[in-house]
Amino acid sequence: MTGRNVNSNYRYGFNGKEKDSEFQNNYDYGFRIYNAKIAKFLSVDPLIKKYPELTPYQFASNTPISAIDLDGLEGVVATNLKIINTSTGIKITGAIELKLKVINLSSKDDFELNLNDAFLEIKDFTTSNLEGPVAVRQSFYKFDSKTGSWDRNSLKDQTVEYDFSIKVSVEQINNLSQAKDNDFIFAIVDDIGSTFKDAYGQEHNTGGFVNKMGGSVGFIKTSSWLNLGHTNIHEWFHVLGLGDIEAKNNVKELKKRLMWHLGGNTGNEVTALEKTEILDHLVPKIKFPLLGGKYISPNYNSKKILIETLDDSNKKIKYDKKKLK
């Protein structure tokens, strides 16, 4: 374009991947090399056994318009998405894969933080609560199975059943180069000095927080992380789309809920409604007809959010800056 200056030394191109300095048509996807000239990977997909229905040289599960190939492994976080009409409403099925990356930015070593035990608890709790059938009554659009679309002019009180298989992986990363902008990331830090006020104006210390409900980045101080089975899972379920519970009525029962936020929690219960809210947040059913059976997580700008939050003086986060590289 006339008058436009281009930096010829810029190393990144298609899908934001780094170009090979010697072979300019090649892009490094980590596990495979993609050649843009012939529009193919130069080696087979290492997950070919997991997806036998796809060609071993496929890109983004053969959905290049609606998905990208993240690292040469796979291009979706949800597959086999289907909506079925039932006698009482609709049934939504599919397979969801969730990935959480954890970086230890605290002064404690990994052994002190019991990382393996914590990772296992997060995986087991998430799978046991989200996998399998769960149903709620709600008012939603009628689904036209003939056209495969929602009837936006017709709301219906119906039973909406979800039945997903869930796979959760939690892995430790040692530097930000191992994270991507569409990753869920947890940072373990030494302390969080900021406080928060509940719905009734009472001030509390902060054990952990996420950048927003349904956000992609969480921060947990070491003392809270070591409270296995609660704070880390509580913050993880914020990432999955749940909000806090703050109420003064029926407190004894509410304290049994995972998302209780006023102290004195006695349990980790997740209701059927909360489970469906999470599933609908992860893969919005309203979008199903447009997805072609597959869904990829969007760009959350996770790395940028992580760095900016650590630098936010209002958060008063203490961490080992030597570990942030």
Image (cartoon, helix red, strand yellow):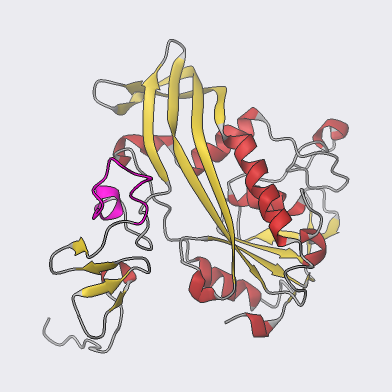
Q: Position of residue 209 (x, y in %)?
A: 69, 59
Q: Position of residue 144 (x, y in %)?
A: 30, 21
Indicate whether 133 appears above or below 228: above
Given residues 93 and 108, the one toward you in this image is 108
Give the position of the C terminus as an image quadrant.
bottom right
Q: Does the stretch in magenta take in 54?
A: yes
In the image, what residue occupies the spot 64% across and 35% down? Answer: 129
Taking the view exactly as shown, the residue that stands out farthest to the top is 87
Indicate whether 24 appears above or below 95: below
What segment is highlighted magenta in the picture? Answer: 46-65
Give the position of the N terminus as an image quadrant.
bottom left
Q: Position of residue 171 (x, y in %)?
A: 58, 60
Q: Does the stretch in magenta take in 77?
A: no
Given residues 221 and 94, the one toward you in this image is 94
**Residue 113 image-quadrant placement:** bottom right
Q: Specify whether 171 is left or right of 192.
A: left
Given residues 317 and 203, the one toward you in this image is 317
In the image, what residue occupies the spot 50% across and 71% down? Answer: 178
Indicate whether 60 appears above or below 125: below
